[in-house]
Image (tube, rainbow, N blue to C red):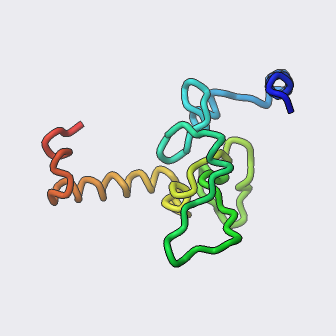
Amino acid sequence: MAPNDALLRRNGVFQISEERGLLDYDRLVAARILNRAHRTICPLCLQELSSQGFFDRLEQAQGREVLDLTVTKLNLFHIEELKPGGFNHRPYNLGWGHHHCNVVVKDAGIMQTLHWMSETLKRNIDDGHFPEAANNPS
């Protein structure tokens, strides 16, 4: 598809979505799917995502390579953790995120993972493993 045709198609999809009430930017921002500039972000680390991540396969550890690896750097990411018997695959609960961030969150959920990461980082700083952070707290 030519770039102009892709842009026309994209704009048409956005227009139809807005007309039908299917595009709520505030909810997407609150769900950590988009940032305030309406750019796609990883729900855990909040880094803007590039479409290149859909094509880049994960690096494999030397000696553990497999030829048919299909895992890319970006994966579908559940905003609220999966719950047995719950309606998990609903709008505003699925976004794109880094594979490694998704692995870190696992079944704990984003907020619980962030609390754990904060406590872990604080223990490491307090133990002197990040002297630059201890000298310059932010």
Q: Quick one: quadrant of the C terminus?
A: top left
In the depicted view, which residue is nearer to us: 84 or 108? Answer: 108
Which quadrant is the N terminus positioned in?
Answer: top right
Q: Residue at x 62, y 47 (%)?
A: 53
User: Image height check: is 109 above or below 1?
Assistant: below
Measuring 63% from the left and 52% from the top, which residue is drawn there?
Answer: 56
Give residue 137's position: percent from left, percent from top: 20, 39
Query: Residue, x 71% and y 70% (percent of image)?
Result: 68
**Left or right of 60, for residue 114:** left
Q: Residue at x 50, y 51 (%)?
A: 110
| 124 sits to left or right of 18 | left
User: From where the camera sits, is residue 49 visible?
Assistant: yes
Q: Quadrant of residue 91?
A: top right
Which one is in front, 69 or 112? 69
In this view, 135 is above or below 106: above
Is 22 on the left or on the right of 42, as rendered?
right
Residue 74 position within the rendered picture, expressed as x and y whole percent measured from the top left: 62, 51
Quadrant for residue 121, please give it: bottom left
Q: Point out residue 5 in the picture as x, y percentages from the top left corner.
A: 86, 25
Residue 77 shows in the view: no
Figure check: 19 above or below 32:
above
On the image, the x and y values in percent for residue 43 come to 55, 45
